Amino acid sequence: MISAGATLAAIRARKPLVHNVTNFVVMNETANATLALGALPVMAHAAEEVEEMTGIASALVLNIGTLSTHWVESMVLAGAAATARGIPIVLDPVGAGATEYRTLTAHRLLDSIGVTVVRGNPGEIATLVGAHAEVRGVESIVAGLEPGELARTAARRLGAIASVTGPVDHVSDGSRVLAVDNGHELLATVTGTGCISSALTGAFLAGKPAEPLEAAAEALAALGVAAEDAADGAGGPGTFHARLYDGLYALDPATLDERTRIEEL
Amino acid sequence: MISAGATLAAIRARKPLVHNVTNFVVMNETANATLALGALPVMAHAAEEVEEMTGIASALVLNIGTLSTHWVESMVLAGAAATARGIPIVLDPVGAGATEYRTLTAHRLLDSIGVTVVRGNPGEIATLVGAHAEVRGVESIVAGLEPGELARTAARRLGAIASVTGPVDHVSDGSRVLAVDNGHELLATVTGTGCISSALTGAFLAGKPAEPLEAAAEALAALGVAAEDAADGAGGPGTFHARLYDGLYALDPATLDERTRIEEL
Amino acid sequence: MISAGATLAAIRARKPLVHNVTNFVVMNETANATLALGALPVMAHAAEEVEEMTGIASALVLNIGTLSTHWVESMVLAGAAATARGIPIVLDPVGAGATEYRTLTAHRLLDSIGVTVVRGNPGEIATLVGAHAEVRGVESIVAGLEPGELARTAARRLGAIASVTGPVDHVSDGSRVLAVDNGHELLATVTGTGCISSALTGAFLAGKPAEPLEAAAEALAALGVAAEDAADGAGGPGTFHARLYDGLYALDPATLDERTRIEEL
């Protein structure tokens, strides 16, 4: 049963360790969002230690936002360790479609490790399923694809739950499609809020590992509700950004359930 | 004709992609400032993809604040790609003069690629033209050099527009010198505001590529006006920093033109 | 004589350069905290320049939060240069105990360079002295160890001043133990506040090099008082974080001395 509040309460009770191998731009922000929510973030990327760190984690988040050779190798090592242990893996294919290196790396990770959820914007996800997308840097525009169908198609083709974020988010396991209608337009004015949604997806998967589709949607609802609160009183992107962590920290399970707007399509 | 407002409007209409190969300290901050202004930032540094990423960008910003071998090689590759395509390049020689490695790397980039604007503090720029400067880490003191003359001399010797920032900024192409008298002293209390000015210079060059001298000065005026707004109500460096992104986001072209204080010397 | 205010005044008068070789997560935050306090931060990690940068610095801070081979080698080079010059060195063994790589690297640095202060949480410090500790990622729980005794034991075994931070901080040189009872619980909700305490320890050591035990305790008192001010009016971790820099910037030497709660055990 969908209950972002119940999963949030489980996260805060267990304080799962979420291991991130992520990009330089958002390391601080994703760690702070994870901590404000109530989970424990850790960032580690050296080949010497990623497998051991994954070995004590409850979820792994891989993000290719500023990828390079050594980092990709470490993502493969950490991903294999997570797959072997059966812990959930989130892949954020930042900028897939913008360069061939990013597209190929995303596919390499999808093919070689057991990705649970791939979380991206419509252009990134469309690129991975071979649809037409215009990706400029890390932003994207997709023409002619209904996002719910994109999520369903991506889940089937990629063999992972697809979490496609936008004004309304769509999460699918290939059969069910959940639409999440929480959030605020100021999220799009701050770098790394997509990466934050991936990190929080890792925390929610750790909090509800048996129902990853629901957990992925609940994570987006929780971030969306926090963003709605952060926007109330913000003077623009900078104060909104600071208030977003306040919002995550202040999330109350009961209120979160009341405000969650998740619909099954 | 100088009009920071008109260039800002052009940036917001076109949303140019600004490719940054920059330092670890300011990646998030420069991306957020670029996004708040209305352009699209992207950070990518791997040799495997920098040329392709530069190939879809409208400006390239190179910043040596935390340089190392692989990063410098990628800067050279990206710079060559930008030079070949004729898109503007900003070089921020962070810490030139503090170590020989930084000074030599700045010269190597100036010599090997087509830098449009070199943006630095007086000590960094003085170092590059061989003048006496005391550079401590990334801060500097220059004795006996009038900053307008420093900018003019640097532009002539380095073969690029020189943008020398300080309490009053001076930008020169070797003949004209523009002084920019916007800003606030709290800018000096936050790490990376110089780097932000370089990133925004990239966005303004993309918005007005035919007039790079004016665009470089306009970028500093825009940041300065945003800083003036951010300081109003700030409780110190931290809240000023958050409010700086609010200020950039809220910039209005008409008001910006009224408040721009650019003077030709 | 203990006086955080006097040391703060000395820091602001001399503006010592503090060279950080630190992790990707907190680079911006530790630089901004150092700058807000009144010292000059610099981040440099390339083997080509770390020794030269350390050569102009007044303190060196090594932090293994996102360590990898090249970075560790640079820490050794910088540490040797600092040892040769006799400037203070702070080691932050982030995550020691979480992976063997981190534990071994911390010991390698302690054994090969002249560490002045090792600053960590109880689990990290306990790991380094061989006591039982549960370290999850970068968080830790230590059972059955009184923190003042842990600090004293660690100082004796590691041959460095041990600064063990928690709700009450304990700093010891192996004989004296100073307890610091400033701070606020919101510090634990923001990533990198431990790293910030290590960076500020570097600044205070530079401000009072002859009395490193006292300087290390004073640094924690200063951060604690700033945190108390930041919490007053904060809406949660995000606005607290922004206000923390305001608090450091606004620290007044006389008031700081009045509010310092350092007790010798």
Image (tube, coloured by chain):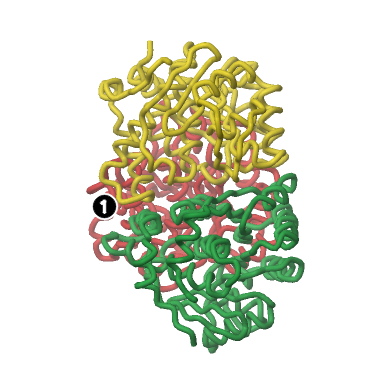
Chain colours: A yellow, B green, C red
Neighbours of disc 1 within 10 Å: few (<14), some (14-19), many (20+): many
Quarter of the figure with residue C14:
bottom left
Does residue A47 show up?
no
Closer to us: C47 or B236: B236
Residue A66: where, in percent of width, then height? 62, 43
Residue C250: where, in percent of width, then height? 30, 62
Identified at 50% across, 58% down, the residue is B11
Identified at 47% across, 69% down, the residue is B220
Position of residue A147 relative to residue C219, above or below, is: above
Residue A265: where, in percent of width, then height? 43, 15
Closer to us: B33 or C215: B33
Q: How many marks?
A: 1
Quarter of the figure with residue B205:
bottom right
Q: What is the chain identity of the residue bearing mark 1?
A: C
Viewed as shown, does residue C64 lie left or right of A194? right
Position of residue A37 relative to residue B194, above or below, is: above
Identified at 58% across, 28% down, the residue is A91
Residue A89: where, in percent of width, then height? 57, 23
Viewed as shown, does residue C88 lie left or right of C194? right
The residue under label 1 is: C229
Which residue type carries mark 1?
Answer: Asp
